[in-house]
Amino acid sequence: MEEKMVYFYCNRAEENRRDPSSILNALIHQLAQTGYPLAKRTLLKLVDDVYHERLSEGQLSAPLSLAESEKLLIQLTDIYPRTTMCIDALDEVEHAKRINLLRCLNRVIRESQNLVRIFATTRMDPDILFQFNIFPRIELQADDNFDDITLFVQTKLDSAITDGALLHGDVSPKLKLEIEDVLCDRSKGMFQLAALHITFLCEMLTEDDVRNSLQDLPDTLKDAYDETYSRILTQKRSAPDIALNAFRWIQCASVPLQSATLLEVITEEV
């Protein structure tokens, strides 16, 4: 039987994505999905045990408590030789309840009979560090990939200059170095943010425009996407409608759309 990987994306703006019970239940749901016959038999017994325990207590319709979720999570991780839980934006969990989630994850790691690893992206808040301080851990900071970001910026910038996208290819060595230095610093380890920064600079017409824009680049991905969206809406004629149609189709499609298919459907509706 292979390793099992489950994941959850936390978001403080959505109640079911910042609540510990919802997070644990989502992990349980994923761990309960398996194609291995032996695991299926074990899962059926675990579900049957929970059902009869709740039946005896008259609580069939009530959601699982944190204690029940934690117990079931430990039992489920015992089925697999190794379990990896990926939790994105752990610090987005509601702060007053976050300690409950952290304690549950802590006990799952300690009490599971098999190896359980947690891969989390988070701000290094004290309560998060404290709960996992007793376990071996590998930390990655934004500046740990500085060399990679530098190479990425240089490659993308060279491509923009060679293709004539940036100032029609007429970029002095001094300006190029200025751009590299600023983008490596302002990207904060995020490749997509660096790529969007270069896209913004490619819209400038003169060296002075580029230098001025270097001071006003978006600080976060959200700011960069907001600025991109605002620019789309200010385009002329049918361009904003076409873009909005594309966004709707991408958001609502049940499967990823090929570029040709997306182009066909959005242009037919305009």
Image (cartoon, helix red, strand yellow):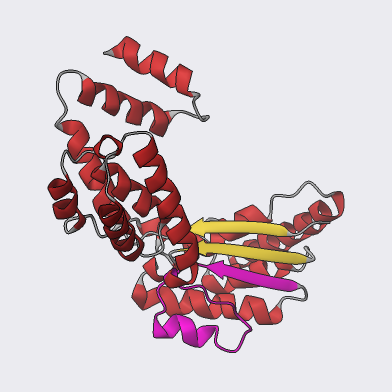
Find residue 83 and report its horizontal and vertical position in percent: 70, 65
Q: Is residue 255 above or below residue 81?
A: above
Q: In the current view of this chain or complex, which residue is farthest to the front?
A: 173
Q: Is residue 135 left or right of residue 164?
A: right
Q: Residue at x 69, y 54 (%)?
A: 32
Can residue 176 be found in the magenta stretch? no
Q: Which residue lies at the image location 74% right of the left edge and 61% below the top edge?
A: 46
**227 relative position to 97: left or right:** left
Q: Is residue 180 above or below residue 259?
A: below
- Residue at position x 80%, y 52% in the image: 40
Image quarter (top left, top right, bottom left or bottom right) of the C terminus: top left
- Image position, residue 52 (x, y; %): 69, 61
Asked which quadrant contains residue 56, the reply is bottom right
In the image, farthest residue toward the right: 38
| Quadrant in the rendering for residue 179 | bottom left
207 on left or right of 142: left
- As for residue 119 lying within the magenta part, the answer is yes
Would you identify the image quadrant in which residue 125 lies?
Answer: bottom left
Q: Pinpoint residue 102: horizontal percent, then vertical percent.
A: 50, 77
* Percent coordinates x, y for residue 33 in the rendering: 69, 50
Q: On the picture, is 227 further left or further right than 34?
A: left
Q: Is residue 60 visible?
A: no
Q: Is residue 185 visible?
A: yes
Q: How many marks?
A: 0
Task: State the residue in front, 87 or 93.
Answer: 87
Part of the protein shown in magenta = 115-142
Task: Report the quarter where the N terminus lies.
Answer: bottom right
